[in-house]
Image (cartoon, rainbow, N blue to C red):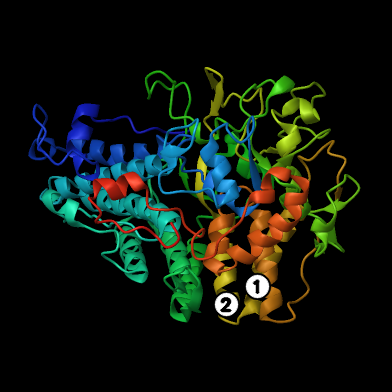
Amino acid sequence: MKIHHKKLLPLALILALSACGEAGLEKEPSGTLTEAEVQTIENLDGLVTAAYSYIGNDHYTAPNFLWPTGNLRAGDAHKGGNGPSDIFVYHALSMYNLIVPDMASFPPDFVDLNDKKWQRNYTAISRANTALRTMADVSDADYPQKAIRQGELHFLRGLVYFDLKIHHKHVPYIDENVPQDDIKNISNMQFSDQELWDLIVTDFRIAAEKLPPTQTQVGRAAKFAAKAMLAKALLYQAYVQNDTHAVVSIDQAKLREVVSLVEEIEASGLYGLLSDYGDNFLPQFDNNKESVFAIQRSVDDGSVEGNGGRGSWPTALNYPVGNSGFGCCGFHIPTENFVNSFKTQNGLPYDAANNANYKLSDPVDPRLDHTVSMEGKPFKYSTGTGPTAVHQGNAWARNPATYGSYVSMKELVSRDSPALAQNGPFFISSMNTVLVRYADVLLWKAEALIELGRQDEALPIINSLRTRAANSQGRLVGTGSTYRISTYSSFADQEAARKALRIERRLELGLEGYRFFDLVRWGVAKSTIDAYLAVEGGRKPYLQSASFTAGRDEYLPIPQQQINLSRGLYQQLPGY
């Protein structure tokens, strides 16, 4: 199913060469190899592989599948699990006002998951910087793949900085040219919001210039993956924010470049929409034409001692419980608000969808049953009839009274899937984590066109996704649902097109981890979350004390531990 990189440098060497990004490691390590001693093709490739491996070494406590920060904060999912104290920090994300800079203060966790993700991201950046610095003095003749590997490293570093940027807005920027002794003097406010975006954009520009259109090894970044991330970074940057995170202008030139970049990706002929929407979420279709870039997952390949591979640990909490055949741990529960958004009227999204909870007779967009598992419907396209094949309602939930019994299904595999592996009480799989999906790329273009006042050009893009959804009912056997979905005949004006685009992103990319960051980019997080809480709080009492503060809750705080380690050099974000 997948090709894995075979060469990994010893852990001691990786840690020695990657020290610059971690607190307390400024001293020169002893008993390890120097950078000069690893300037062989094998070892240089090993440094690149180490940078790749880090994005796949994530975990539910520091995931690169952004369900906690992208879905819980968006009103699309409840935390789930066994109540608020079961990983309390995820409960805090759902409540907004409970988030504090020192999340280690949250009992009973006493682990600052915000800080943990920060540390892991800077370790990944350190690995990329180490590899770039080490190969800088190696000639092209001695290392024929040098330019390509440099492109991959710029791509990977850009990915990680993008993640930090959308979570924290202002972060310290460290590249391979920063002397180790100077790292402690770099503030998270050294660059403005727009300047920091420029640095991230530059990484993707360099990557796009150096990378070939295709790579022989599956999983390596290539030119058009870099162009896609360049388009994404420019799209985010185009929505210019003030110091309290309000959108104050939209950069038309950047939007035009987004359109141009996506047109280059389209013209490459390397990517396309799968005929069946559901194939995107089945492990047998990993690395398909819709997957522009993905974290390569594995199980039972011996690559990681103790757990049998680099499986999908970010999703390990999300399988159903009870008699489902899994047993752990019932997290990431879709909200009624999210489920209701799939209702249709005359085949188009229904404005009053959230007035009443979904019932089986309601006409819906077929993507609902590709995304959410619910009582009485087959789980993950099962054709069986037993308790592991058909959702059993509350019997599949740990705390249905608090969160309900829905299951987020895209990131999971069926109980009998050969991609599944069990480690203790947890289930992981070898299904890739797709970071850039072609449908998402097309929607970036549609969004840019609409904001440029060219909504008629966005119409066929949105309709192509709706047509694909309408034709993706073959796997949805036995759901009992009534599917009604149609295309838009036209958009009355820019605002109507903008509304259609934003709904389409929610439906097409539902629970894939993007929603909250979309809301912040558009400048509508406060109004959207307030409307969500006003209704969902009546359905789920735990939300009645939740509140979203504009100018604060658009971003997570700089971890207090990092401010302490910087000796006060790092500045906290507004409101924290």
Q: Between 550 and 372, which is closer to the camera in this rendering?
A: 550
Q: Which residue is mark 2?
A: 451
Q: Is residue 52 above or below residue 178?
A: above
- Label 2 Cα neighbours within 10 Å, binned few <14 / some 14-19 / many ≥20: some
Where residue 303 sits: x, y (%)? 37, 24
Mark 2 vs 1, N-terminal side: 2
Q: Between 497 and 217, which is closer to the camera in this rendering?
A: 497
Q: Which residue is mark 1?
A: 498
Q: Is residue 387 above or below residue 186?
A: above
The residue depicted at 61 percent of the width and 24 percent of the height is 328
Q: Do we see residue 71 in this rendering? A: no
The residue depicted at 77 percent of the width and 25 percent of the height is 395
**In which quadrant of the rendered view does residue 480 lie?**
top right
Q: Between 400 and 439, which is closer to the camera in this rendering?
A: 400
Which amino acid type is shown beneath numbered disc 2? Answer: Glu
Tell me how many marks there are. Answer: 2
Q: Is residue 209 above or below residue 481?
A: below
Q: Are marks 2 and 1 in contact (CB under 8 Å)?
A: yes
Left/right of residue 529 with respect to residue 126 in the rendered view: right
Q: Between 165 and 4, which is closer to the camera in this rendering?
A: 165
Left/right of residue 451 with respect to residue 566 in the rendered view: right
Where residue 404 sits: x, y (%)? 75, 37
Q: Element type at marker 2?
A: helix
